[in-house]
Amino acid sequence: SFWRAAPFAVEALRTKVSGERKIAELRKIAKAGTSPLLDFFEAAFSPLPFFAEKVPFGDALFGGPYQLSAVGVWEVPPRISVTVGFNTEAMRCIVASLPPGLGADTRLGAVMSAAFISCD
């Protein structure tokens, strides 16, 4: 049921949830271990099911609010799309090569980097 409702919250996640709040939640997942973190990034970087598979949850997670352009028009800020060409196996292979015993923040940075590297 969460994934059926998530597409309707994507815009609010992108524009109303602060970066500080987003990173706090990511840190909580990182403290739970590598497996939950991998599962989260796999879900975030994959198109959302049940919504024409076009809603970019990960893009909203790492995107920001609209910005006022030079001509006075509100626009989506330029950013990468984490859902384009995402390769789950590549991310998991990179993470499998990490040394054991990483702290939560280091683990988060490593898994996040692996996820970004695994996109086209």
Image (tube, grey):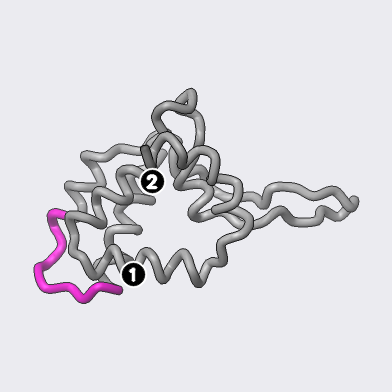
Hey, what amino acid is under mark 1? Arg
Q: Position of residue 93 (x, y in %)?
A: 17, 47
Count of number-bearing discs = 2
Q: In the rendered view, would you say 5 is above or below 39? A: above
Give the residue at x 15% y 62%: 98
Which structural element holds mark 2?
helix
Give the residue at x 66% y 56%: 65
Q: Nearer the viewer, residue 6 or 48?
A: 6
Q: Which residue is mark 2?
A: 44
C-alpha span from label 2 to label 1: 15 Å
Can you say which quadrant of the picture contains the C terminus? top left
Q: Position of residue 49 (x, y in %)?
A: 39, 29
Q: Residues within 10 Å of mark 2 (few under 14, many from 20)?
A: many
Give the residue at x 54% y 45%: 10
Give the residue at x 50% y 72%: 20
Of all residues, the one furthest to the left in this rendering is 100
Which structural element holds mark 1?
helix
Q: In the rendered view, would you say 28 is above or below 16? A: below
102 left or right, relative to 83: left
Q: Which quadrant of the figure has residue 4? A: top left
- Mark 2 and mark 1 in contact? Answer it, CB < 8 Å: no
The stretch of residues the image draws in magenta is 96-105
Q: Position of residue 102 (x, y in %)?
A: 17, 73
Q: Which quadrant of the figure has residue 25? A: bottom left
Of all residues, the one furthest to the top in this rendering is 52
The tag earlier along the polypeptide, 2 or 1, is 1
Q: Which residue is mark 1?
A: 27
52 left or right, relative to 33: right
14 left or right, relative to 68: left
Hey, what amino acid is under mark 2? Ala
Instruction: Examine the residues drawn in magenta and state their main secondary structure.
Output: loop
